[in-house]
Amino acid sequence: MDNLDEESARVSISQIESIGETLFEELFPEQLRVEYWKRIKKLREQGIVKTLLITSDEPWIPWEMVKPYEFGEDGEDDQSDGFLAETFQTCRWLAGRGPFDGVRVQAATVVVPKLDLPFARREQEYFVNTLGPARQTLVTTLQRRADLLDAFADGGFQLLHFAAHGRFDGADPDASPLTLQDGELTPDQMSGSSIRGLRTQKPIVFSTPAYGASCLCAHRSGRLGGQTGQ
């Protein structure tokens, strides 16, 4: 958007909003749409509901882009709301075993390679200077792929946070990598005994790669591909 003129940016935003509204109409059944306007939106505006957990069989749907919209029939006003990722603390979960009721984080690993990502520095500072002392949490920062693979094998942490570049591979989305200090991390590097620590510890995983997908809430299948590379 930064490289677009005002008119082009306006058109692009309008197109994105239209996609989000179409997703709401196609993905949300009528009963759920009614419930959204009747209860969910009002509870959020009252400050009672702030988070939204979406459980789905399909990991590829961009749920965060859903933008609620309802055409007003019979003279009624249209109803419109912001994108789910804009108005809620939105997260997704694959259908099956549900998330834990609570997780005690005693150690956290933050993956922040030295790349041109200014906000990544802020994320690192938050974990090291704020979350760590406040929660008495041991925070380890990693930059190199080799060190991260060692951490995957050894485990010992309950939270894993990525702040790195992601590159979408249109020819093979499941192979979309994350860029680290000494190379790319791809899903095929994560299998078998190489991720024993992850399988054992089952940490919460947050992935916010630039140019990639943004919401990976938990490591469940032993692979980060697919959801991080959307």
Image (spheres, rainbow, N blue to C red):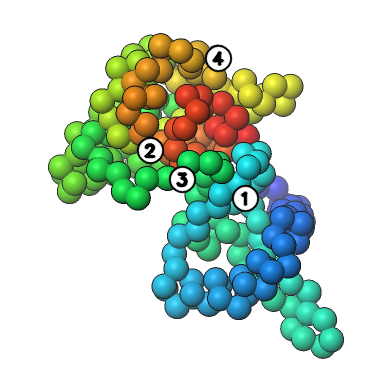
Question: Disc 4 versus disc 1: distance between alpha carbons?
Answer: 26 Å
Dot 4 or dot 1: first in sequence order is: 1
- Which residue has dot 4 on it? 188
Q: Nearer the viewer, residue 15 or 174?
A: 174
Residue 164 location (% of width, % of height): 46, 30
- Residue drawn 63% across the image and 24% down it: 174
Question: Disc 3 versus disc 2: distance between alpha carbons?
Answer: 13 Å
Question: Disc 4 versus disc 2: distance between alpha carbons?
Answer: 21 Å
The three-letter amino acid code for the residue at tag 1 is Trp
Residue 227 location (% of width, % of height): 57, 34
The image quarter containing residue 23 is: bottom right
Circle 3 packing at 10 Å, graded few (<14), some (14-19), many (20+), is few
Residue 128 location (% of width, % of height): 23, 38
Q: Nearer the viewer, residue 33 or 212?
A: 33
Question: Where 135 sits versus 176, above or below?
Answer: below
Question: Where 212 sits versus 185, above or below?
Answer: below
The three-letter amino acid code for the residue at tag 2 is Ile
Disc number at residue 204? Answer: 2
- Which residue has dot 1 on it? 63
- Which residue has dot 3 on it? 98
The three-letter amino acid code for the residue at tag 3 is Gly
Dot 3 or dot 2: first in sequence order is: 3
